[in-house]
Amino acid sequence: MTRAIRIHQTGGPEVLQWEEVEVGDPGPGQVRLQQKACGLNYIDVYGRSGMYPVGDLPAVLGMEAVGMVDALGADVDGLAVGDRVAYPMTLGAYAEARLIDADKLVRIPDSISDETAAAMMLKGLTAHYLLFRTYPVQPGDSILVYAAAGGVGLILCQWANLLGANVIGCVGSEEKAELARANGCHHPILYRDEDIASRVREITDGKGVAAAYDSIGKATFEASLDSLQPFGVLATYGNASGPVDPFSPLILAAKGSLYVTRPTLATHISTRELLMEGAERLIDVVASGQVRISVNQTLPLAQCAEAHRRLEARETTGSTVLNI
């Protein structure tokens, strides 16, 4: 027997239960992992609350972790017992041990710590597809990053800065503005005190941004559209304020022949080739120190409910890791 965080019903943080579960032996194409640390992500909140489906209940939540290969099933190539690996976007990460398909795993070099590995896969690969696929950032582009002091936001700011972008970021406090600035955000906007679109126009001399990377959703959709230059791209990739309301495509014409997309990491890692393209690029920039993964909160996995409470209350910056 091992322990995991499970839910028996959807709801608030109080539904997260630390309890014994059975793991068993890996089947064909699977490995068993002894896990070291898990990442905390807003998608975990969506699963816990019922916004996103998690399958039959009770269910183990969590979408990314790092661990050691403990046992191999049949037909597993390229991995060995003792290999240190991490993964994103595979439900069931909130556990001391688990079974997982081998083709979901990425080897992690010794130069990257367990805490960094646990925090970087889902958020780092999200930043990767946004910057390299959804709207491929070019030197000199102005971009708008929401939650710029959050886990994905800090990675986006650093990586976009590395690509030569003019980075504008939305934050909720002066403290978060300083953190974003220290991580490559050239122009923090205090969204509680300033009109986002007006401030973006001021910063860009009236031009607007080439892309807005919006993880907030409903509350910021119009501000994002109004911040874009003609032919600009709005990537609405999260729902922290709730899902975007239905809208008429005609508003995209009126605001400058704009593009709106709702991407998801699952699509961008749906094949082994796509996963490894992003993972190799991510590991390179993290191992080289060009992009730092800011793990600013750590808690034991057993205190997962408190971690969820802090995340939803916007009391966190950077990444939170749940240690096992």
Image (cartoon, rainbow, N blue to C red):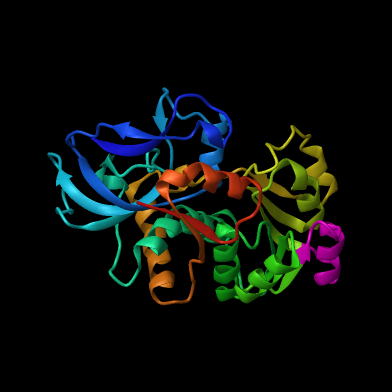
Residue 275 among magenta residues: no
Q: Position of residue 15 (x, y in %)?
A: 51, 31
Indicate left or right for 209 with 307 as reference.
right
Q: Residue at x 66, y 52 (%)?
A: 314
Residue 46 picture quarter: top right
Q: Is residue 89 among what the camera can see?
A: yes
Q: Is residue 88 among what the camera can see?
A: no
Q: Residue at x 57, y 32 (%)?
A: 49
Residue 205 among magenta residues: yes
Query: Compared with residue 244, is residue 132 higher up or lower down, i.e. above or below?
Result: below
Q: Position of residue 236 (x, y in %)?
A: 65, 47
Foreground residue among 121 and 262: 121
Q: Position of residue 282 (x, y in %)?
A: 42, 64
Indicate left or right for 185 with 277 as reference.
right
Q: Quadrant of the N terminus?
A: top left
Indicate left or right for 93 with 170 as reference.
left
Residue 57 picture quarter: top left
Foreground residue among 300 and 190: 300
Q: Position of residue 227 (x, y in %)?
A: 79, 57
**Image: magenta residue range:** 189-208
Foreground residue among 176 and 240: 176
Q: Residue at x 28, y 56 (%)?
A: 85
Indicate left or right for 4 with 51 as reference.
left
Query: Compared with residue 233, is residue 72 higher up or lower down, i.e. above or below?
Result: above
Foreground residue among 75 and 274: 75
